[in-house]
Image (cartoon, rainbow, N blue to C red):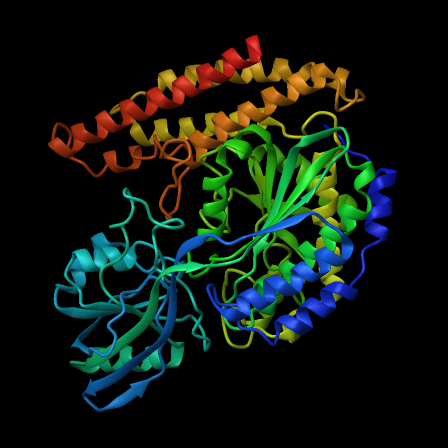
Amino acid sequence: MTFEIDQLERAVLNDISTEVPKAILERFVTLTRESGSEDERIAAHFLAQYLEAWNIPYRIHHPRIHVSVPKKAAIIVTHPETKEIRAKTPSCSISTGDRWISGEVMYIPANEDDLSDAFDPLATKKYGEVRGKIVLTDGYPVSGKTKELGMEGALGVIFISPGRYIHEGTIGVVWGSPDLDTMNEEPQIPALMIGKQDGQDVIRACQAGKVSLQFQTHLDNGWFTCPLIDIWIEGTEEPDKYVLLHGHLDSWHQGIGDNATGNAALLEMARLFHKHRQKLKRSIRIAIWPGHSTGRYAGSTWFADQFGLDLDENCIAQVNCDSPGCRWATSYEDMTWMSEAEELCKSSIKDAVGERSKGTRPHRAGDYSFHNIGISSFYMLSSSIPAEELKEKGYYGVGGCGSNIEWHSEDDLLHVADLDILVRDIRVYMTTILRVVQSPIHPFVFTKTVEELIETIEEYQAAAGDHFSFAAAKGEATALLRDMQEFYRQLPFLSFASVSDPSVKRVNAIIRQIGRELVTINFSRTGKFRHDLAVDMPRLPDLAAVHHLSRLEPGSHPYRVALTHLTRGQNRVAWTFQRVRKLLKNG
């Protein structure tokens, strides 16, 4: 599948202006856009004023979503000497209120190669019993770890930042607002965060002898009404089909690089798409979410719930816009896209800004709240600081701000933004989206996806050895690849047809349905319209339990449970491949 830079792309990209983005950044630096706050409402109203002035159709929804807003935290070392340590508490922590929790500190080192993952709970036993202790460990607060420590009886957990900043974060494992299936999944003990230097001081004290401390955490946990902006730019030939472009409104502190720059980009793109709407073949829907950080993607999850049937029927792709336009972020070597969108994204980035790019499988983050519907997806974070520059600056890994370490801190201010780089990132987004909206045939190559799934099954078979056979899944996947290759060989005949041609519509309906099937089994465990927990999702998650087999005693109860799990999982995967094959033959 090849793409050409057409007249519409040139016209739209030549019209990019920094006037409105600059005004948005200058206004947003005066606001703390915490979900449920007055500043968040002011920010939404500020953006809506532009939409009104430009006569762009939009709605502001006011969903009531569950959020957890950290307010303050305190730590006082009480032994061997009295010392107060600056601390924060992450979203979704237990709030102790005015009650102090006291106990002995137990240090458990994290894997130095991956500070995003605190430690393997199975390895904690070599450090002693955590029951009744306050655990100190390295890295960011991450989903699942606090809950696991609570189940082992720890009083609380303190995470040590990899640098001088104490980066705001969350320990929540519930994706979006809870339902009856997930309401009891959150951690049940408090969590805190401290800076690197304070953490090292406490570690040395622990190595020298007994250390005791006390702490408090204060959070506002509850249901808040928040603004959600929903913009509609209608296409001319197939207006019911659309690309969903989105980013979050709420922030930690002023949050210029995460995500005021994203809001600025979304408004500028809304202006440009609307200006050129008479030439758009399909529609573009732009959503600006609340509840990203403190709600664990509660805004986008509400949207997926409320408009799930429409998204299933009409959404071609979803595109996240987070942290574009940050200083020094000139590399596109750390992008995110699903396999079927790789060719589209690489060619778009090359044509838009002349850069090579690399992309990885989307991780469980970034308002990707649409896996269970099965929507093809690309982009999450935008450009980033090149790897060699990160090394020169001594920067550690962060989750936004174009790799600037002010991410999720009080210093994420105007100096983090770069309007020239923002223009580059807008060019990338608009070029890629225009190619989805304008291409007669949806530009997603699912042969690439099936090849990846076959590789995954082969990897799982190697891990299983003689304990389990994935022959059924492998056979169906191999047959599907042959059918898929034949399907795509026929598509060039329609590449110059009209978007409204019945044959084009029929083929595109098949492509969207392929995504509904393959995206779902590759990124989700739960059923349609349900949301998986906010934990890492392995490829073909129904089969990923194979990695447990090597640690289990053959013939034991856990071993047979795992085999049962894999049998059921393989049935789902093979059945899905069969459904796609029937779709290709009969669609």
Q: Is residue 488 above or below residue 245?
A: above
Q: How many labels does the image show?
A: 0
What residue do we see at 64% from left, 59% from top? Answer: 263
Rendering coords of residue 516 (x, y %): 51, 28
Question: Can the viewer see residue 109?
Answer: yes
Farthest top residue?
586
Residue 188: % across, % down: 22, 60
- The one nearer the camera, 46 or 19, is 46
Left or right, 476 with respect to 545, comes to right
Looking at the picture, tell me which residue is in the foreground, 461 or 143. Answer: 143
Residue at screen point 60% across, 76% down: 30
Q: Where residue 317 sits in the image (x, y, percent)?
A: 60, 36
Q: Quadrant of the C terminus?
A: top right
Q: Give the quadrant of residue 222.
A: bottom left
Which residue shows up at 32% across the image and 26% down it?
569
Residue 213, percent from left and from top: 21, 81
Which of 90 and 328 lies nearest the eye of the viewer? 90
- Residue 111: quarter of image: bottom left
